[in-house]
Structures are given as structure tokens and as C-alpha cells.
Amino acid sequence: MSRWRTILGLSVLALLLLALPMLMPLAKLDITLGVTVLLFGLAAASVNLLVGYTRTMAFGNAAFFGLGAYGAALFVQYIKPNFLLAIAVGSIAGLVGALVLAPFLIRRRGIYFALLTIAFGQVFYFIAYRMTNITGGEDGMTVTRPLLRIGSWSAGSHEYFFYYFVLAIFGLVMLGLWYVVSSPFGRTLVAIGQNEVRVRYLGLNSDRFIFGALAISGFVAGIAGALYAMSIEFAYPLLLDWHQSGDFVMMVVLGGSGTFWGPLLGSAIYVIGQNVLSSWTHAWQIIIGGMFVACVLLFPRGILGLALRQRRTVAVTVAEAKTP
Amino acid sequence: MLERLLPELVNGIVLGAFFAIVAIGLSLIMNLTGTINMAHGSFMTLAGYLAFTLVSRGTNFWYALIIAALLTMVVGILTERLLVSPLYKRLPIYSLLLTFGLSLIAEETYRLIWGPSAVPFGPPTYLLGATNVFGAPLPSYRLVIAVVLLVVMAALVVFLYRSRLGLRLRAAVQDSEMLAALGINTQLLYMANFAIGILLAGVAGVFAAGLLGLNPNMGNNLLMPAFITVVIGGMGSLTGSIVGGLLIGVAVSVATLYIPVASELVMYLMMAVVLLIRPRGLFGEEGLFG
Amino acid sequence: MSTAVAGALLEAREVSLSFGGVKAVDQVSLSVQPGDLQAIIGPNGAGKTTLFNALTGYFMPDAGEVYFRGQLITRAPNHVRVRMGISRTFQTPSIFPELSVTENLAIGVNSQKSLAQRFRPLSAAQRRAVDERIDELLGFVNLRKARDQIVSLLSHGSQRLVEIAMSLSVSPQLVMLDEPTAGLAEAETDGILSVIRDLHTRLGLTVLFVEHNMRFVSALADEVTVMERGRVIARGVPTSVLADPAVRDAYLGTEEVASV
């Protein structure tokens, strides 16, 4: 029964995403918004790996996202305006960022882990902000998106092509993440999120698994950031700021922390919501902030979390209670 | 050489005192309930704006400081009781997100009420000049701030170690379950603890407004250095926040003498070094928070 | 330094552990031979669980040594000790609440077969091996019917059985059980009793357990160590230990010893 539901749900999602360039203008929305939803969805998915699956409080993933953005932008600007290489560079930048931070983060848990991710996130923000000569400082740096070339075929410069390319990458990365999450490694990550002590008392070094999750998280966020810089043809320091990190975490919680598609859903709500709200009122940030507060207080399991409730009923409150 | 160093040292102590007092407020809240208050900066900014409003209506700067800090504390208490306390039993990520959401609401609210650009709020005119300290002229306002903040910190230490409420707060950090079993109202303790943290933020906020310029983002600019102070000083340690804050303040200010552009870099380098050598922070306690 | 007593599976020598000035475990020595079924008893606060924690690497002792199969493990990380052959349960069942019974056991089985860190999906043969092992474990604790149940929805007694099965999933040589009957009704206690007895007789495992239930202790244990206030105050076979005036003193005013 649930197998068919999954296939149906995925088909609907796929159709929706494929048809988006046709649907968005109907709602008076620009297709670049669709690109942003997908890319923020990837960034949120990278956060979900930590916050949702292993339940480590990663509040600095914007640093990896931003590293991806600047990595791609700098590569295009100073080395070679090659689209695919730029994405590769960005993803590696995100990965390297995670690898550099991992040794510091690995031995900590709980709020100290969160504190360190926040602090280190700001280090990267500071670097982007200060290296004005290279990165353009506060004003950021503009880049021209190189045309996508594969061999001798070159894609058009129309936004539609770019959207479908991003959709393809999105699909590939999500497929990869699905692979990871369903693998024994992924199941161990989930177990760590449930009860790390027990995982260790089953003979597993949880530190190594969290290291792996961090690396994958950084890589995925890096891809998302690189594509985002190519999308808006701009890279700026606020992409690495704790507000951006907080937004990503919020998307995860809104959509459903620990669910596979929650991050995409959260991203869609946030991105489109922000877009629509800001055209209604200057004070849209109050509404967004209010939405965050309401979500945390009233439906912390997020939308998909509630929908998949049949599995998680009593179990969630048991898992989340701090005292036995 | 010394003439150039001394003012920077004093500057450093002032800056450090700011970092320290914000870090202490953050620390108090974190240590007791595991709440990382991302809205701490917003409370500072609120106090600044309230003081500004009072001063524009003719209130004396010092009265405005006290009233603004107290009003901000009241807002803090309401926030804690209504929004933060329901989350104590849950995973810490939720209180982190809640305070983050609050900071977004606060920033926009300030923008709506007082405008997006900086409002003119300065120290009282009689503090605008310089005072001679050991022959070097130092800005009077900064001197006064340093003195007041240091006095406040000392008062806090005395309160925590000599008063009954202080004793209970310290005991609660160790084992609040035990305190509850002893019949002590731990909810009241959580509230008082949060209130003190916000009160400190309020005082710092009013002073900072006169020093850094008062705009909707003012408090957030002090928040990050405060986090780094807590990391360097060590989680779970108030001494760490004080010493760490002063150390960072002095280091950053002295570094401004030599490498003005990257003076903040010193702060991040210090953090990296401390974490490599002593991962729990200078005065941090192992295993308290993971 | 000194080497372990020949043949002892687990040995603790003058192990001490303090928390902020309070000596929770005070120079405790203990020796468990292969095939033993030993119990540790004592009034609340005696330091029994803390001793377990020191022996299993949940906390590191302040002083003393711990040996396992002749190797010094005093400072070894907990997961390493498990890999060496020590397994434990906790006072409150330490399980994966939101996962099913099968999924709970799978983690330990995967760990034992070095599959837990794999990115590639298991081959059909590997999956069969894992499923068989899980089935075997479920059969041992009689939970086959509950295999797809979410663990947090099970009864307390069943959760304890799941935890025992999990502790077996890593193929240990020594199983340490912390108050396995805590919070259980009389009927469930008998169930756990037979499971633990089976651990010993059918699987040939060495068992060390902490208990408050004296009937349980008398029925199972070959040797009993009594702790009070962090120290060992008596040791021997159940009948002599429970008749020991010092032990009765330590329990003075409690129901536990009187009921035996």
C-alpha cells in the first residue's frame, strides 16, 4: 500500500518540477524562483543530514553554501569561465570547508557543537567580507554565467535551460542522498540521532559517522552554493552569515526534520512565501519570523513530519524528552 | 610607543568589557537551560532604542539607561515565560530556532518604528571630551563605560557567590532536578536567570548604542564576538567569559595598531589556537555540555 | 606494571571514580572468570551503576586499572571495549525508540559484521545473513511476533528484552546488565530471569549484573559482590552474603533483604 503511495507521490513531484517553467508564470512568479527553491532545498537537505538524521545541531552550513558560491564565482572570474568546472570547484570548496571544521566539531555535541558551528560560520563570513580585493568585500562580486558546454554542444542561455540543468543536478544529488540514507551508513546515522550512546555500545565509533555526515553535508551545500552563484550571477558575504544558516535550519524544521523531502518542502514554503509576502508588505520579515516561532512552538515535527505521523506518534516525545 | 599603546589598551579593556558582559549574559542563559539566545543582540538593540526614545524626550542619560535596561528585562521575562520556557524539555535546536525567529521579528520591528538607518544617539555632552590618564588623553565616555561595566561584573560575581538566589542559580546549573526535588521553584529560577542575562544585555546595549551607533542591527554585531568569547573562555564558565572577553578586546585593539584591516582576524585566530590546544576553552569544564 | 590475574575475563583493580569530591566508587576490585554468573548488589547510591560505567568506558576511572582478557582497557573508549567483547544494558533501556525492533537489532548485527559503515547496499547474501541473525536473536528473547513494532510502543519488559537482544547482537563474551528487572511486574521478571539464565547456560556467556531483586540474585548468581557507599563490603555465594550482618546492616530498614 505505502509502496504505491510513494511511487505516486514521487511521480506527482517529478511532474510538478518538470512543468514548473510553465506553471510559474501562471502564478505570476519568475522561473528563477524555481531555481532558488531547488538550490535552497539542496542546502537544506545538507543541513537535514546533520540536524534531522544524526540530530547534531549544525547552525553554520551557510558557510559551506557560501564557500561553494565563492568557489564557483572566483573560478569563473579568475581562472576559467567553464560552467561545469566551476560547479565542481564549488562543491569541492564546500567539502574542504567541512573537512577543515570537522576535527574541531567531531568531539563535541549538543549546544557546544552548535556554538562551534555558529562561530566557525562567522569566520568564513569574515573572510569573504574582508578580502575585498579578491571577493569584492561587502558588495560581493558579480560574475557572468558561462554557457553550459558539454563537448561541442552548447546549451542556450535561456533561463529555461538553466532551470532544467539545475533540476537535473538536483535530481542526481537527491538520488545520491537517497542512496546514502538508505545504505547501512545512513541507517547508522539515523541510529546516532536516536541514541548515540547505544550506537557506541554496539561497537561503533559515532565520531567517524558524524565526520562522514559533515563531509557529505559540506559537499552537497557546496554544489548548491555554486549553482546559486551561477544562477544569480553574484556572490556576496551574507550567503555565509548565520542568518542564512538559520534560514536553512528553519526550512528543514518547517518541512519535517529527518524526513527525506522535508527540506525541499520547507525551501518551497520559505522561498515562495518570502517572495509573495514581500510584494504585499514591507514587514514580511516579521511574518516569516512569526512563522518560525509558530512552527517551533506548535508543530515542531514540520509538515511532512506530521503527515508521516503513523510511524512517529509516541516515539517522538519519548526521543525528544531530555529527562528519562 | 607607550603613548600609542596605552589608549589602545584602555580601548581594549572597554571593548573587552563589552564582549565580556554580553558573553556573561549568553553564558548564564546557556549554562542553566541550554538555550542559545540568538535574540540576545536584539535585546541589546531594544534597550538602545528605548534609551534613545527616553533621551529624546528629555530624560537624563543615566535614568534612561536604568529605565531602558529594566524595561528590556521585563520584555525578556515575558519572552522567557511565554515562548522560551515551553521548549526547555525539548531538544536545544528548538530554542535556538525560536530565538532566531524572534531576532528576525525584532529587527524588522525596529526598522518599522525607528527606521532602517542609524538614529542619533550619543553619550551625554559632558562625557564627550577626553580625560587624562597617566598623561594620555582617553575618551571619557569609554572610560566611564569601562568602569561601569567592570563594576556591574563585579556586582554580578558578588551576587552569584554571596546571595541565596545566586547560590540557587549556581546549584541549578549543577542539578536542577535535585533542586526541584528539594521543593525549590525551578521555573522561577529559570526566569530570574534569563532576566539577569537580559538585564546585562540591556546595560551593554545602551552603552553600545552611544559608542557604535544605533541601528536595527547593532546588537547582532556584538553577538558574534560574544559567541567567540564563550568558545574561547569556555562553556560553563563565567570566569572564562570575563577573562576571555577582556583578552579578546585587548588583543583586537592592540592588533588594530599594527594591522588595522584584519584586527578581527586576531579574534578568530585566538579561537582556533585555543580550540586546538584546549578544546573545552580556557576555563571550560569538560563534558558539561557535550 | 602488574599483569592481570591469569584467566580472568574481566578484572578491576582498586578502581576509583569521584564526582566533584564525592567518591562514587572507592577502590573497588572485582574479578570475573569466563563462564561466571556474578551479581553486584547494594543499597541505592552504593555506586553499582557508576562501577559499571567505569568498567565499560562510560566514564574513565580516576584511579585503578581495568583488564579484559588480560589487556589493559582502563582508558579505552567505550566502543573499543564493545569490540573487544563487553556488552551492556542500562537501567533505563537504551534503545532506538522510533525504529522497529528489527531495525534496532540490525544496527548491532551490521556492526558485528562490519557492515555498518557501508555506502553500498547489502548484497542478497549479506541481507539474508543479517536477517537470519536478527531472527535468531529475536527467537532467543521470544520477540519474533514483535519484529516490526516500533520499540517505544512496546511494554517496558519487552523493551528490556530488545535491549538484551541488542547487547547480544555484537557477539560479546561478557554481558553486563544494569538492573534488568527494574520496573517489571512479577511475571515479566520471571521471563527475564529465564532469558538471563539461558544467556549463561545455552550461549555460554559470562554475565555480570546489578540487581535489587534479591530473589533474582539468589536464583541466578554464583557469586555476589556487595557494595555500600562506593566500597565493597562483602563478597561470596548468595546465601552467605545475604546472611552477613554487615550486609543486613547496609540494607537496614529496606524491604529487599528482609524478603529473601
Image (spheres, coloured by chain):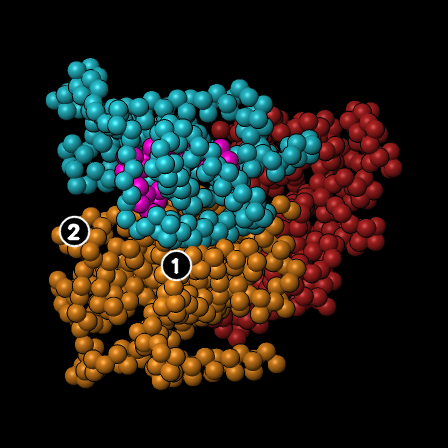
Chain identifier, cyan in the render = B
10 Å neighbourhood of mark 1: few (<14), some, or many (≥20)?
some
| A153 drawn magenta | no
Q: Which residue is found at the position 21% from the left and 52% from the top?
A: A138
* Element type at mark 2: helix
Q: Is residue B242 visible?
A: no
Subunit of label 2 = A
Q: Start and end of the magenta stretch?
A: B194-220
Residue bearing mark 1: A283
Rendered image quadrant of residue C14: top right
Q: What kind of secondary structure does the magenta stretch mostly adopt?
A: helix
Residue bearing mark 2: A132
Q: Which residue is found at the position 56% from the left and 47% from the top?
A: B82
Chain identifier, orange in the render = A
State the image coordinates of residue C12 (x, y, percent, origin top left): 60, 34
Q: Nearer the viewer, residue A7 or A60?
A: A60
| Labels 1, 2: front one | 1
* Element type at mark 1: loop
